[in-house]
Image (cartoon, grey):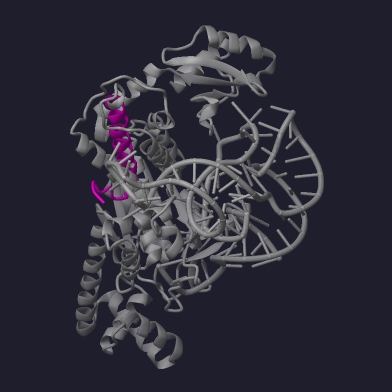
Amino acid sequence: MKATLERLIREALGDPQADFVVEHPTDLKMGDYSTNAAIKYRDKKEQIFEYLNNHKPEGVEKVEMVGPGFINFYLSKDFYKGSLNKIIKEGDKFGKGESLKGEKVMVEYTDPNPFKEFHIGHLMSNAIGEAISRIIEWNGAEVKRANYQGDVGIHVAKAVWGMKNGERNPYVAGAKAYEDNEKSREEIEEINTKLYDRSDKELNALYDVGRKESLDKFEDIYRKLGTKFDYYFFESETAPIGKKIVEENTGKVFEESDGAVVFHAEKHNPHLHTRVFINSKGLPTYEAKELGLTKKKFETEDLDESIVITANEQSDYFCVVLEAVNQIYPELRNKMMHLSHGVLKLPSGKMSSRTGEVISAESFIEDIKGKVKDDEQVAIGAIKYMILRSNIGGDIVFDIDKSVSTEGDSGVYLQYAHARANSLLEKAGNRGQVTGEQGQIREVERLLYRFPEIVERAQAEYAPHHITTYLTELAGSFNNFYAHEQVIGDSPESGYRLAIVEAVKIVLKNGLTVLGIPAPEKM
RNA sequence: GCCUCCAUAGCUCAAUGGAUAGAGCAGCGCUCUUCUAAGGCGUUGAUGUGGGUUCGAUUCCUGCUGGAGGCACCA
């Protein structure tokens, strides 16, 4: 429909390159579609309007020009009837698009570190990464989910030191000892070197046990969250690859400085800065490992795009790494995309892994469960929704008692509307077709058919919150409809009303699914 | 000091350069003899500050103020 309207406007203007937009107005009172073409081309205002009025496409009932020259299009009753039929017919597939068909995309997210706690920051990365993956999938691409984990490095040595000393919480104890005690620090440094080359049997044993325990525990959390990864990459494997890449390009891209190998990114872009890729001990840093990871990803799969999701604090760092990629593998640079998210805060204060006040994902989920009748699906939905409803990139203040509870702008609200629609259909025992007489067009009908466009826009902008906003609006309209219309009954319209309920159920379910939020049938 | 991001209602968040800046919470007032009240209806209330570009600016440019993150061997 949108494309048809655009074509007609270009015809009216006689200019195939004309610059204007056709959009859904924010207020439904202003029509189903709207264009600013008559404002952009003020001298041809009447000409455009007249042409559109005389060439109304099928499905458009009314065309009007208001205000400074907005032209609004109102869709016909038949269009809505047709769209209900389409939604019911397509069912689970409604909303899927093909704009990315044939593309293969890898999305890397979550990235917890073995030996350390899976905390609410990882929860945030996971919710966003899973939603982005699904949105891209819904638009036709093949998605490979990847998880990159730091299984070597000083944080691991700290944890192994803690294990060796029989600490109940090995990483926290090791981290504290590293800060407070010089002797412990030396021990930890030594453990780190030994773990890198796996030269100490006793340490290896501790390491292997700790690594497995930790990874198994992560899997439990992924199951709860509804994520399944295709690839797990580890720093222990990317480190040697990255080191080799840097060594091969030292003198060309990288330079030696104070015994380390560095990249002067500011030479290529004044906004960037210098970073160390191989330290003076000859060990590759995170930067070099990232280069190794990049190479490995593109060797593993023939990717059209590689998306990495991390916290904001890695933003500037990532720009430097991307510039290094640009120098070494220019053909890969424009296939790479970095998205960064903010910090999940509780109103009581920030969370920090350094001060030890980490909030583990598990305890957090348990806390929320306690507020929603102990239903895990609802708790997961509440958390994911709170993360996805706001723009990626901003910090999120998560108020457990208020925002998550159960009302209004929340995951529970959407799940509840969906469950309620499902229950109505079960009671009616009648579904799968549009029957009965069509009544007046309601807000809920006017929202339903927009879903596919919303998913496509969310994909284009990497903005899951467009979908949450839409779903909340739809659920609100449905609840309003529900409160005011007798759905089940003998009236001539009740078959048609039931079809609306069915369509709502489908769209809510698909919408929640595309966000990675559970959609229980009953609540 | 330099770089990046951010500033919208009492609170948490929206708004592809467009129409009267939208929601939800909280507050106030209604609403269950009827299909899920975890619901619905009504109501109060906002673009940090000075310029600029534009027919039109929350949006783009710029000065200031305030906040977050980053800036060489952590990730």
Quadrant of the image containing the N terminus of chain A: top left
Where residue A60 appears, x then y in whole percent? Answer: 45, 16
Left or right, A398 with respect to A138, comes to right
Task: Work out whether residue A424 or residue A147 is closer to the camera in this orientation and state it.
Answer: A424
Instruction: Give above or below for A269 relative to A438.
Output: below
Who's the residue at 63% across and 9% down the image? A47
* Quarter residue A19 falls in: top right
Q: Is residue A348 above or below residue A163?
A: above
Q: Quadrant of residue A305?
A: top left
Left or right, A146 with respect to A463, comes to: left
Depth check, front residue: A325 or A514: A514
With B18 as the anchor, is A366 left or right in this view?
left
Magenta span: A495-523
Q: Is residue A210 magenta?
A: no
**Nearer the observer, A400 or A309:** A400
| Residue at x 43% of width, y 77% of height | A357
Does A516 lie within the magenta span?
Answer: yes
Q: Could you tell me if residue A257 is visible in this image? A: yes
Q: Position of residue A163 (x, y in %)?
A: 27, 84
Main SS, magenta region, reads helix
Vertical placement of residue A296 versus B40, above or below? below
Q: Which residue corresponds to the image point at 24% horizontal and 68% vertical from the top-left? A: A217
Image coordinates of residue A303 in percent, x first then y, are: 33, 43
Q: Where residue A107 sits: x, y (%)?
A: 35, 49
